[in-house]
């Protein structure tokens, strides 16, 4: 879609020129006080996301639900953000970013109160739906408000700080959340998000105000298409295990000629996604304002950045779901133990996300991305071979550190590629695409990893039980292997108490379960390593030039967008 400002703005589309122009036109340096509020807003969202895996054990015990049900809080948050963020971006442009920012921060505070006082898992899930809906506007608001309040070098620094804020949140969430979850309970963890929401609301009064544009029309048809696409895709992936990967399981709400509805929902979601793109391009050709300006994805390098972002965030979500689930549910250890086990990973992500910007003037995005994906692949393969029931071993810590280096570098890098490629007027659109990609990837990564692990565990248990003569078929028949899940040894013993198993058979079953759980975990890391290796394809298409070496053809292409 052509931008009316392109004809009059000589810096349009060129990050180098735009930076120079903005610096020259706004020579004064603004106070960093407004940025503190925006930084804390990113911390608020990321802390909430990081606190959910830590709270899984407490929610499982408090509400009496399996971990896959408790993990729904993670899925619905990402689902709400991803489904609504594009609509939220346009709503912010219409109402005004500062006003809408204050409203949704207050809504986030309400969601924290729901988590603190939730009597059932349903209330907790609804609380995360509300938090996700609020974050759907906060995500694009952060980029738009940075563009509104800062120029030149200050703007670049502010954008980079969002990546370090996200990493800092993961580190602090595991430290604070792990400590509170162990010595007090999982609910006080969300008192932290409540306090952060109050601080962000107060700092919002330091932001430069904007009036919004009531003339902006929100494309409700496109909102419906993209919302349906994301909801269907996420629901499909999230229920692959319970409803069946191909053929319908008894737990499926319905079937289509014997087929599971889960893969059908995924296919329908992909179709609605394609319809959204067709409709959006049609509106742009008619000269109407689309829900999101797809010109920010016009270049192959920008599309590659989105693909790379999806992969790395999905892998991060899978690791953040797998490790806490294994430590708390399988090993029966405390949230504080989880925070210690994840400390090397989260600390490394924070440091890397903060320092990686120093390499941008020396190495191209393509080089950094390929190297970083190489690190994540090597780390995941390494973890698959060295991981055992003790997460504090040096080889395991080393694997988490290497994975953290690659992950921290990639999340910051691909976001900067998108931001520097787009003019200031499209900051909200870049923010909405970032939010959609990251949160959809997080939801899909969590859901798919859960389905893969549980399915693999069930298959492994069934196969191994057949090879153990001390576990006769009549005993195995009394245990519902079709609904196998990750449980601790004590929980398994309780299940076997209701069967005809004698003491020797109980211990044999416990040993078998331990063996298969660890085998499943190792296989999960190998699968993630394969995905990481495939990410070299989009990574190889990222820009091959440094920010100060933008070729003339790239400038011309963007100016004509």
Image (cartoon, rainbow, N blue to C red):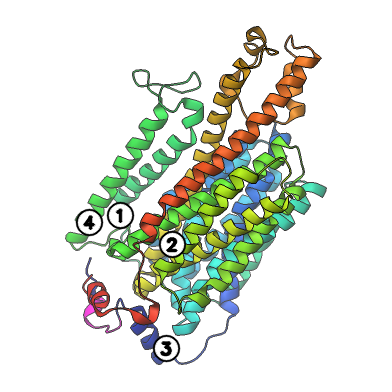
Q: Does the residue at mark 1 contact the one at mark 3 (Cβ under 8 Å)? A: no
Q: Earlier in the sequence, mark 3 or mark 4?
A: 3
Helix, strand or loop at disc 2?
A: helix
Q: Nearer the viewer, mark 2 or mark 1?
A: 2
Q: Which residue is mark 2?
A: 370
Q: Earlier in the sequence, mark 4 or mark 2?
A: 4
| x and y percentages locating residue 521 in the rendered image | 60, 38
| x and y percentages locating residue 505 in the rendered image | 75, 15
User: Mark on residue 23?
Assistant: 3
Q: Residue at x 73, y 20 (%)?
A: 508
Q: Which residue is mark 1?
A: 219
Q: Is 263 on the left-hand or right-hand side of 449?
A: left
Q: Nearer the viewer, mark 4 or mark 1?
A: 4
Q: Earlier in the sequence, mark 2 or mark 1?
A: 1
Q: Does the residue at mark 4 contact the one at mark 2 (Cβ under 8 Å)? A: no
| x and y percentages locating residue 536 in the rendered image | 40, 56
Q: Which residue is mark 4?
A: 281
Q: Nearer the viewer, mark 2 or mark 3?
A: 2
Q: Does the residue at mark 2 contact the one at mark 1 (Cβ under 8 Å)? A: no
Helix, strand or loop at disc 1?
A: loop
| x and y percentages locating residue 135 in the rendered image | 52, 56
| Disc 2 from disc 1: Cα separation | 38 Å
Place residue 296 in its image quadrant: bottom left
Give yes or no for residue 102 being in the magenta stretch: no
Q: Residue at x 57, y 84 (%)?
A: 31
Locate the C terminus by quadrant. Answer: bottom left
Residue that protrudes farthest toward the right in the picture? 183
| Disc 1 from disc 3: Cα separation | 34 Å
| Disc 3 from disc 4: Cα separation | 34 Å
| Disc 4 from disc 1: Cα separation | 12 Å
Q: Which stretch appears magenta? A: 5-11
């Amino acid at each position: 879609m052509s931008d009316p400002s392109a004809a009059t703005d000589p810096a349009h589309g060129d990050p180098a020129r735009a930076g120079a122009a903005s610096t020259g036109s706004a020579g004064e340096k603004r106070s960093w006080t407004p940025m503190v509020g925006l930084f804390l807003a990113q911390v608020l969202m990321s802390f909430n996301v990081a606190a959910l895996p830590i709270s899984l054990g407490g929610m499982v015990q408090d509400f009496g639900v399996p971990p896959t049900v408790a993990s729904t809080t993670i899925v619905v948050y990402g689902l709400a953000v991803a489904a609504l963020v594009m609509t939220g971006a346009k709503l912010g442009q219409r109402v005004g970013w500062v006003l809408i920012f204050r409203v949704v921060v207050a809504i986030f505070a309400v969601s924290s109160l729901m988590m603190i006082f939730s009597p059932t898992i349903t209330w907790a899930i609804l609380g995360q739906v509300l938090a996700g809906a609020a974050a759907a506007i906060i995500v694009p608001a952060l980029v738009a408000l940075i563009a509104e309040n800062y120029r030149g070098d200050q703007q670049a620094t502010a954008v980079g700080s969002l990546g370090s804020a996200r990493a800092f949140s993961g580190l602090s969430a595991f430290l604070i959340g792990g400590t509170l979850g162990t010595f007090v309970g999982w609910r006080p963890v969300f008192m932290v998000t409540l306090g952060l929401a109050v601080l962000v609301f107060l700092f919002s009064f330091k932001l430069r105000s904007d009036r919004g544009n009531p003339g902006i029309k929100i494309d409700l048809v496109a909102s419906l298409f993209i919302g349906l696409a994301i909801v269907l895709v996420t629901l499909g992936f999230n229920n692959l295990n319970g409803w069946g990967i191909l053929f319908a399981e008894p737990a499926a709400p319905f079937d289509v000629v014997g087929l599971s509805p889960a893969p059908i929902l995924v296919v329908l979601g992909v179709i609605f996604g394609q319809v959204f793109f067709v409709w959006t391009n049609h509106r742009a050709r008619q000269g109407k304002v689309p829900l999101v300006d797809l010109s920010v994805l016009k270049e192959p390098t920008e599309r590659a950045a989105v693909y790379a972002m999806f992969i790395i965030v999905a892998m991060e979500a899978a690791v953040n779901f797998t490790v806490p689930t294994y430590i708390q549910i399988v090993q029966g250890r405390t949230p504080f133990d989880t925070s210690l086990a994840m400390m090397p990973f989260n600390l490394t992500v924070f440091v890397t996300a903060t320092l990686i910007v120093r390499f941008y003037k020396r190495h191209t995005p393509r080089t950094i991305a390929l190297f970083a994906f190489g690190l994540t692949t090597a780390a995941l393969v390494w973890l698959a071979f060295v991981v055992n029931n003790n997460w504090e071993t040096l080889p395991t810590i080393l694997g988490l550190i290497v994975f953290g280096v690659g992950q921290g570098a990639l999340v910051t890098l691909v976001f900067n590629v998108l931001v520097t490629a787009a003019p200031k007027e499209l900051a909200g659109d870049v923010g909405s695409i970032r939010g959609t990609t990251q949160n959809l990837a997080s939801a899909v990564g969590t859901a798919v990893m859960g389905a893969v692990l549980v399915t693999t565990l069930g298959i492994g248990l069934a196969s191994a039980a057949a090879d153990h003569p001390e576990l006769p078929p009549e005993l195995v028949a009394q245990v519902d292997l079709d609904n196998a899940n990750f449980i601790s040894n004590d929980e398994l013993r309780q299940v076997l108490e209701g069967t005809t198993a004698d003491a020797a058979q109980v211990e044999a079953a416990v040993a078998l379960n331990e063996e298969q759980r660890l085998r499943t975990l190792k296989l999960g890391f190998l699968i993630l390593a394969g995905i990481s290796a495939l990410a070299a394809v989009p990574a190889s298409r990222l820009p091959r030039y440094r920010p100060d070496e933008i070729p003339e053809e790239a400038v011309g292409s963007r100016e004509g967008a």
